[in-house]
Amino acid sequence: GSTIGILGGGQLGRMLAMAAANLGYKTHIFEPGSAPAAEVATAWTQAPYDDLDALRTFAQACDVITFEFENIPAEALDVIAATTPLFPDRRALETSQDRLIEKAFLRDLGLKTAPYAPVSDDIHEVLETTGTPAILKTRRFGYDGKGQARVMAPEDAETALASLEGAPAIAEGFVAFSKEISVIAARGQDGAVAAFDPGENLHKDGILDTTTVPAAVPSSLNIDAVLIASKILNALDYVGVIGVELFVTPQGLIVNEIAPRVHNSGHWTQAGCAVDQFEQHIRAVTGWPLGDGSRHANVTMENLIGEDVTRAASLAAEKGVQIHLYGKAETRAGRKMGHINQVTGPA
Ligand code: ATP
Ligand code: MG
Ligand code: MG
């Protein structure tokens, strides 16, 4: 097919649309709000995800559909999948959009997660499973650390719980990690899997700040990370790019969460790999062979958050810096406005 539909019109959709154009495809964005992707796409349907008629018309106009946004209602996906191939599929999205389902899925695969329990009225009983410190997280809709509350000691529990305002939540035991890494991997329609090298992630105020490759971890952990991602991809019979966030601990890798889409911590691939994560995803959903994931450069990706974007011009003057700006009309504190990839040397 020649038109790729993308649910979600943020910066991830924008970079997917640009990658699609490079392969000769048209793109059609479906996005309820403002859409940095719309101006680089061929078409834009601006409608809410519960407008099933608009979704049906959108689906009929596309040859294959994917998404860059996790909080799409399952019914919307059903309407789409009735007429048009959808990659990744509904199961992949449903598994990752609810933290309780996600954790149970990972456990069933034999992977390690933080100790967890669904939050119930008796928060102290819940904390017996997780221990303290713990983190309460809403089951759905959380990103950039939003919808989370820390419980340092049992006496903090009521205040933390109240801050979630009754949203369904899970409690997780606090993992004493030494580093956070993530692995971006892809699976094709033929079941072939390719992974990029794990990156090391630093967060600031709950938002990803930098990703550096190579991650400064023993090579056995890099291999473990890739095996974990492959296991998840195969279990979901997944097609497309996935992001898997991991904690490094003395007991090995613990899976934090999975994102069924291209991932902010994979932006370094634009400067580090012949086929970046965006082209890789487009290749997967359209049935092209995957890039092999190999890396030719060491890279640090830095997000430009809010007013950071004013530094773009001076950063552009530095050697080995690639600039990506998302064309968002308004600069707001905490908003991802762009990122840079700094090439620090050959791989
Ligand atoms: P994202 O923007 O990556 O989707 P999110 O809002 O879904 O983030 P998480 O990734 O679950 O949230 O948590 C945000 C950060 O909080 C993690 O990257 C990690 O630094 C810290 N964190 C989360 N869970 C735990 C835990 N169980 N133990 C220790 N730290 C944690
Ligand atoms: Mg998340
Ligand atoms: Mg996360």
Image (cartoon, rainbow, N blue to C red):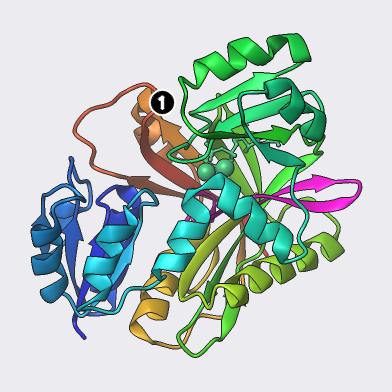
Percent coordinates x, y for residue 110 in the rendering: 77, 64
- What residue is shown with label 1? 334
Percent coordinates x, y for residue 128 in the rendering: 81, 29
Binning the other alpha carbons within 10 Å of mark 1 as few (below 14), some (14 to 19) or many (20 upward) gives some
Residue 286 counted in the magenta span: no
Residue 240 lies in quadrant: bottom left
- Which residues make up the magenta segment? 245-266
Q: Is residue 110 left or right of residue 55?
A: right
Percent coordinates x, y for residue 339 in the rendering: 43, 43
- Which one is nearer the viewer's eye here, 202 or 230? 230
Above or below — where is 90 with respect to 15? below
Above or below — where is 154 with respect to 1? above
Q: Residue reaching furthest front?
A: 121
- Res 261 visible: no
Residue 178 lies in quadrant: top right
Residue type, label 1: Gly
At mark 1, the secondary structure is loop
